[in-house]
Amino acid sequence: MTQYTVINKRAPRLDAPDKSTGRAKYVDDMTLPGMLFGALLQSPLAHARILNIDVSKAKRLPGVKAVVTAEDAGLIKYGVSPARYDETLFCHEKVRYVGDEIAAVAAVDLETALEAISLIKVDYEELPAVFTPEEAMAQGAPVIHEEYPGNVCAEVHQEFGDVEAAFQDCDLIRTDRFVNKRQDAAFLEPNGCIADYDRFGNLTLYTSTQVPHYVQRTVAMVLKLPVGRVRVIKPYVGGGFGPKAAANPMELAACLLSKKIGRPVKMNYSREQVFLFSRARHQFVHTLTTGVKKDGTIMALKNECYLEGGAYASFGIATVYYAGSLLAAPYRLANMKYDGYRVYTNKPACGAQRGHGGVAARAAWEQQLDAIAEELGMDPIEFRLKNVMSAGDITCNDLNMSSFGMKDCIEAVKKGSGWSEKKGKMPKGKGIGMACGFFVSGAGYPIYRSDTYHATVTVKLSEDGGTATVYTGAAEIGQGSDTTMALIAAEALGVRYEDVRVASGDTEYGIDLGAYSSRTTLMTGHATKEAAESVKRQVLQVLGDRLKVPVDQMDIKNGYIVFKGETPDFSSIRTAYIKEHRGWTDNPDEEPLTFREAARLAYLEKGTIVGTGKYKPGKLGGKYKGAAVGTSPAYGCSAQVAEVSVDMETGKVSVERVTDAHDCGFAINRTSVEGQMEGSVSMGLGEALLEEVKFDEKGNILNANLAEYKIPTCLDMPNVKSLIVESNEPNGPFGAKEVGEGAIMPTIPAILNAVYDAIGVRINELPLTPERVYMAIRRKKGKQ
Amino acid sequence: MLLPKFDYHEPLSVDEACQIMSDLGEKAKPLAGGTDLIVNMKKKILSPEHLVALSRIEDLRKIELLNGSVRIGACVTAAELAESQEIKRGLGALGQGAGILGSPLIRNLATVAGNLVSARPAADLPPPLMAYGAEVVLKSRRGERTLPLETFFQGPGQTLLEIDEILTEIIIQRPPESAGAGYIKLGTRKALEISLVNVAAYVALDSSGTTIEAARVVLGAVAPTPLRSPSAEKLLIGEKVDPSLFEKAGQAAAKDSRPIDDFRGSAQYRRDMVAVLTRRALNMALEQARRA
Ligand SMILES: Cc1cc2nc3c(=O)[nH]c(=O)nc-3n(C[C@H](O)[C@H](O)[C@H](O)COP(=O)(O)OP(=O)(O)OC[C@H]3O[C@@H](n4cnc5c(N)ncnc54)[C@H](O)[C@@H]3O)c2cc1C
């Protein structure tokens, strides 16, 4: 195995000093000279025709600089997927959910802006509203978008193999219906932004986003500005998890206001507005039918799914595809049929959230597989091991598992959790359960159809030779991508981690599609590695010319030049370097030739040394409709064992221990990999036990705050034993692939299966609140 | 979520505070930890023109023992209650309630008087305080009065506190050695939780240690105010301790409860949980009573 000097160890994060001392600057910490404050007017009704908007009073309020509505913004349609651009910056004829944006104001301070908002008078004609897929799809239901008369935003019908024929050969066929709940991503930092349109026609948008690149394009398109005039800068971001993976109306409104007034405009979402904007996990209703042979071979899966989408498409087309395609692994499955419907309702739009589209499907299926294993009299782990795919397998829907440590993950959690000693031997009220999952390591295609690179990176050496800076558009949103890129650059270049700086999250630094679909380590990592290697080659070339040593006889490691043969006489280089640095206290003396000296020499010969790297995956996937969704250059996979204790009298579930194994290909930074694994468990645990966005009968959110929308506290978090599995992904930089989202896949079903083990009854609806668990126990008692 | 504008007063004594309250009447509200009031002001549910901060009045921050009673100053925080030795000794259920109120950040600010005057049906301190038979002292320019806490609550957010009054202290008669109490809160997560149901129970045993001489069962979050369960208490008093007795008391308490369906949970679940929690709280109380 290759000996690495920087990666695969435990590196402190680049942002740790800033974040742990409170110095990290988030967008709300920023102030620009002359900055104004903006606010939004949002609909109080779930579905209504707008008869009239009167902004005259608001405009007259002293301190107000501009009031904008659809009249100013125009009616350019935008959204996430170009196939479903269904939003305009401001509503014109109708509002479609409580929270739909109608107008925006900029004023000298926030108080004034909010007061102006309250002075805008809108006359509505209320329309009947629909809040569930059943209501929305019913005959004669009110239509939310004229273009979609049946309120179906997108539907998918796929069949691979022949499911009905395969069912004929099955010994056991089981059907289950499963429901999760609409989520909020509950990131710490509410979205915020500052738009700054200058006198030269350049727009700079500082914003809390996962995707500077897509925001740049959307802003340019909606405001009719050349893309080259729009710069998006992402300061530190306090989490995203999906809802920040596209432009939001607040960003567009701030840009419009700043363009109109010529001064910077700051806007923030309150926590309630974060809930109203939503774009987090959909509610999925899955009906799964699985057929198996007596020996446990999985033969076929029929999957029908309805997604409650909310008022706009957002990521929904991709979501409805993912809810089908992401069941094609990690088990060998020749026959799979999927019918998916994403339905418009008069609620906030749902979008993408960690484990996009696959989390509810995975929970549903892994629980069903557990039930099947039980019916077959097989241990759930043995059952899964019998069916798992291995590296090189291709799924029935043409996804290529180029590396796949699924079996290793299962064996790791089996051993790590003490499964064999515990399963079937726990007292009533205690249970153990396991589940598996897999996920893409970067979407195979950009959101808009394009041959664009997914990442371009520049590495530049400082002219003194001492440091290398990585310039990337990649979005550090707390997941640690800056640290990862620094480590990759340091390793590829041969310098120390401390000698690399990272400038990121700015559209000026290159193309990067952003932090979504668990893509950054693999994709930006490739580009960073290539750029760093280019720099290394350039330095060694100059050095080789000077010393008359072939480049392939030299290397750079840990900041020193390594000569494979005899060390040539480099004293002239050193003497020149020391002469240039008279008075410096850190000049090299007895030591081998340093990178610094070589890099300085390269600069003196060639000028500033810059290397560039780029990445895009090759052609991926099959030819059928929707084949692109689910493709990826690589797939991560994981297995988890959860141990729970259930209070049989109150129904309260406590997750006591989780053993988690994840195949990330190769760990660039072991600490970051474990961090993602633990974070996934916490998020999955919340979704399994606590989280649900609740509405009243008029479409108002009842719990649009973090007191009533409950995410786990540190006391609810179990100890997590994280086991890293490395399968050396051929398509990944240094063999690395994802851990960001795949790690959440097994959490919910592992908990579901453990709760079943504890109480003896299956629950097919999330979250497992004490009441839901108690009622299930009671129903079971009633039956006995 | 901006605060409305208000004037801020910082009296140094109770008298001064009463004077301000008397002068300003309806326009003013006392401010203790602010964990309830400031939140409501940000939500624009309340917008008093004046806030009268009580935080600099030293007299309101003490826990004192006086002739067999414990006097808890209005501004004693939940964190202080949870850690106080005086409370741990003999008033353990109150310490338990204070120790699971909110989160560490909230406990450092939240005061006992704020918890009572905000009068939330699910609040954590009224049930244990009522189980100990606490009284509240209300003071104004017009004079001082002492009320049993259980008469103080009138409905969600409503108490007998008059506009110009300040709650200055809570008085609890120290329970006898042969008594014990327990408090349990049920929520969906382990911290920062609004009770779905909470129950405090108090029992005092006779000299033989086998018969229940006095009992109080208080139910939270199952009625507009914290509620004593007369049926459960009646069932317990004068009876010999045995496991089925507590089971029956739990059932009786469930019948006395008046829960509603809301988005946090159903009335049926809450009622069922009253039975479970009552039995458990009684067991805690008994265990403590026997330890003495
Ligand atoms: C995140 C969060 C979590 C919470 N969790 C819980 C919980 O788990 N359990 C729980 O019970 N509560 C909880 N609360 C509610 C609140 O923290 C408590 O009720 C707290 O005890 C209120 O005390 P305070 O000192 O902050 O009151 P304040 O907000 O200062 O005042 C509340 C009310 O009481 C009045 N008041 C205060 N002191 C006096 C006085 N001496 N005389 C007359 N009137 C007075 C005020 O005018 C105001 O109307 C929570 C609140 C938050 C924000």
Image (cartoon, rainbow, N blue to C red):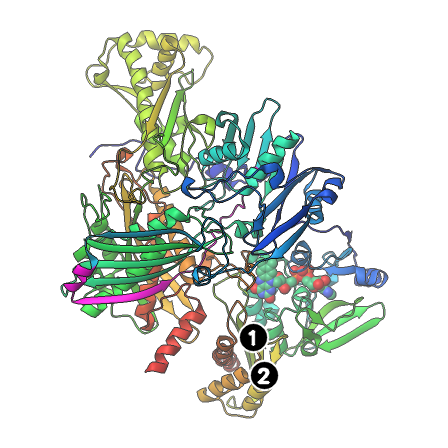
Q: Quick one: B255 or A127, which is closer to the camera?
A: A127
Q: Earlier in the sequence, mark 1 or mark 2?
A: 2
Q: Quadrant of ligand 1?
A: bottom right
Residue at the (45%, 46%) spot, across then down: A314
Coordinates of residue A511 in the picture (x, y in percent): 41, 29
Give the quadrant of the N terminus of chain A. Answer: top left
In-image side of A581 versus A451 (left or right) = right
Give the quadrant of the C terminus of chain A. Answer: bottom left
**Amino acid type, mark 1:** Ile
Label 1, label 2: how far apart the Cα atoms are: 17 Å
Q: Is residue A264 visible?
A: no
**Comparing labels 1 and 2, the label whose residue is closer to the camera:** 1
In-image side of B147 versus A545 (left or right) = right
User: In what element is the residue under mark 1?
Assistant: loop
For disc 1, the marked residue is B260
- In the image, the segment drawn in magenta is A164-193
Give above or below for A487 relative to A540.
Answer: below
Q: Residue A599 occupies which quadrant of the picture?
A: top left
Q: Quick check: is A190 in the magenta stretch?
A: yes
For disc 2, the marked residue is B229
**Amino acid type, mark 2:** Ser
Which chain does tag 2 point to?
B
Q: Quick one: A771 or A151, which is closer to the camera?
A: A151
Q: Residue A179 occupies which quadrant of the picture?
A: bottom left
